[in-house]
Image (tube, helix red, strand yellow):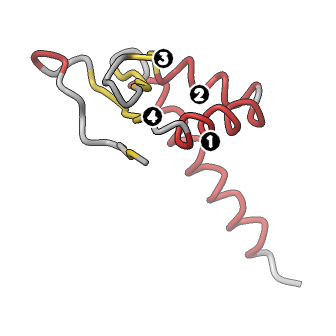
């Protein structure tokens, strides 16, 4: 039996933990914004709060994101540090 499997799993877990730490540190300044087809804001939450909600209730988070996309909503991650609050080009999808 080789020892590479637990080590590679540990490396993957470490990279996920590092990504989560980065999101939490950026979570104060970045917000997840859900807008409808008329460009009205339906939901605006800090990334850190969204991350906590996703970890606490992953099924509900997945269902909510699916409903938002099927309902022709736009989901963006906006950086509030930029002048004028312009959206950051992180992830945007319009269905």
Q: Quadrant of residue 70?
A: top right
Disc 4 and disc 3 in contact, CB within 8 angstroms: no
* View extreme (front): residue: 38
Secondary structure of the residue carrying numbered label 2: helix
- Residue 71, given in percent of the width and then of the height, sits at 53, 36
- Residue 93, given in percent of the width and then of the height, sits at 39, 46
User: Mark 1 or mark 2, which has the lower sequence index?
Assistant: 2
- Residue that numbered label 1 is attached to: 66
Badge number at residue 43: 3
Q: Is residue 61 above or below residue 10?
A: above
Q: CA distance from mark 4 to mark 3?
A: 11 Å
User: Mark 4 or mark 3, which has the lower sequence index?
Assistant: 3
Secondary structure of the residue carrying numbered label 4: loop
User: Mark 2 or mark 4, which has the lower sequence index?
Assistant: 2
Secondary structure of the residue carrying numbered label 1: helix
- Residue that numbered label 2 is attached to: 51
Q: CA distance from mark 3 to mark 2?
A: 15 Å
Q: CA distance from mark 4 to mark 1?
A: 10 Å
* View extreme (left): residue: 83
Mark 3, other Cα within 10 Å: few <14 / some 14–19 / many ≥20: few
Mark 4, other Cα within 10 Å: few <14 / some 14–19 / many ≥20: many
Q: CA distance from mark 2 to mark 4?
A: 20 Å
- Residue 14, given in percent of the width and then of the height, sits at 61, 49
User: Mark 4 or mark 1, which has the lower sequence index?
Assistant: 1
């Amino acid at each position: 039996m080789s020892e590479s499997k637990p080590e590679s799993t540990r490396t993957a877990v470490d990279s996920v933990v590092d990504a989560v730490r980065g999101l939490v540190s950026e979570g104060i300044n970045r917000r997840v914004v859900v807008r409808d087809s008329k460009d009205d804001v339906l939901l605006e939450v800090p990334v850190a709060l969204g991350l906590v909600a996703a970890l606490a209730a992953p099924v509900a988070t997945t269902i909510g994101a699916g409903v938002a996309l099927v309902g022709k909503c736009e989901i963006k991650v906006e950086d509030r540090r930029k002048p004028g609050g312009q959206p950051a080009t992180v992830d945007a999808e319009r269905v």
